[in-house]
Image (tube, grey):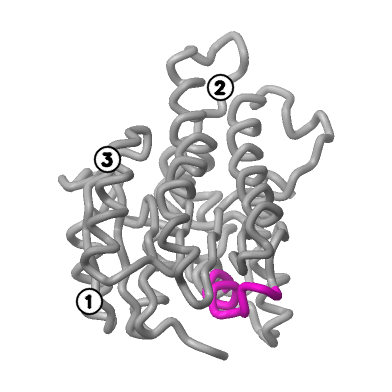
Amino acid sequence: MADLKGKTLFITGASRGIGKAIGLRAARDGANVVIAAKTIEPDPKLPGTIFTAAQEMEAAGGKALPLQVDVRDEEQIKAAVQKAADAFGGIDILVNNASAINLRGTLELPLARFDLMFQVNARATFACSKACLPHLLKASNPHVLTISPPLNTDPKWFAGVAPYTMTKYGMTMVALGLAGEFRKAGLASNALWPKTVIATAAVMNLLGGEEMMRKGRKPEIMADAAHAVLTAPSRGLTGRCLIDEEILREAGVTDFGPYAVTPGGELMQDFFL
């Protein structure tokens, strides 16, 4: 399998969880990783900052650029993208990972939280993609990878959680739109989603707590799946809604045991699948 040595990745929400895992996997290849996230002060419930993530990525063998970015702010995005391009001579890969979640029902969800999810999920995916595109289109094997689910209009995915589903599907629609619009230019754009629950701080604090964590897989499975996508020829793999386990099977992986939080334990399928 090819590697990401010397490639520059701009990853939103990379201070923890899946985004950080993707950055660490790339760093092991010797990649440059731009950590575009909000957290600069430690939080007991959400461990990790852009600075601690940068230290880990450099220790893994890569180069890291921690940048505090609120992905709701267009000017902050533009400034961060320019700093990244200036520091590393361009941008090869964008990973749209930053996401906000709120699963309250229609009567309980404040409109401000509705707006927040749209801004952090669908709008930021578009804004970050737009800002990175001039650099990506100059790269030799450019990829946009968006951490969002496959589209499905079955009402069960909307009942009680329509705003969240709309915003996550919005991310996927941006990914597919980029694939169609820039296919001839050689840009790959895909969505990637886990087959099972992934053990992250969001699962621990917002979803099912420790019980759900025990039924999940480690973020490293998403990192390895992302690596398989991002090292593929951009003209050959684009416009797809990919599942982590499926893309790894395509890459020849057959043993998924090491990814389980509980070895040999029951796995919980992801919400959107």
Q: How many neighbours does mark 2 have within 10 angstroms: few (below 14), some (14-19), or many (20 or more)?
A: some
Q: Which residue is mark 3?
A: 76
Along the viewing direction, whichever of 114 and 104 lies nearer the viewer: 114
Q: How many neighbours does mark 1 have within 10 angstroms: few (below 14), some (14-19), or many (20 or more)?
A: some
Query: Which of the two marks, 2 or 3, is nearer to us in this view?
Result: 3
On the question of residue 55 being in view, the answer is: yes
Q: Which residues are magenta?
A: 225-236
Q: CA distance from mark 1 to mark 3?
A: 24 Å
Element at label 2: loop
On the question of residue 261 being in view, the answer is: no
Earlier-in-chain disc, 2 versus 3: 3
47 up-or-down from 224: above or below = above
Q: Residue at x 64, y 46 (%)?
A: 172
Query: Which of the two marks, 1 or 2, is nearer to us in this view?
Result: 1
Q: Which residue is mark 2?
A: 104
Q: CA distance from mark 1 to mark 2?
A: 39 Å
Residue kind at label 1, given as amino acid type: Glu
Q: Which residue is mark 1?
A: 58
Residue farthest to the bottom, as pictured: 1
Expressed as whole percent of the image width and height from the top left, the position of residue 89 reads 28, 71
Expressed as whole percent of the image width and height from the top left, the position of residue 100 reads 46, 36
268 up-or-down from 86: above or below = above
Q: Quadrant of residue 225?
A: bottom right
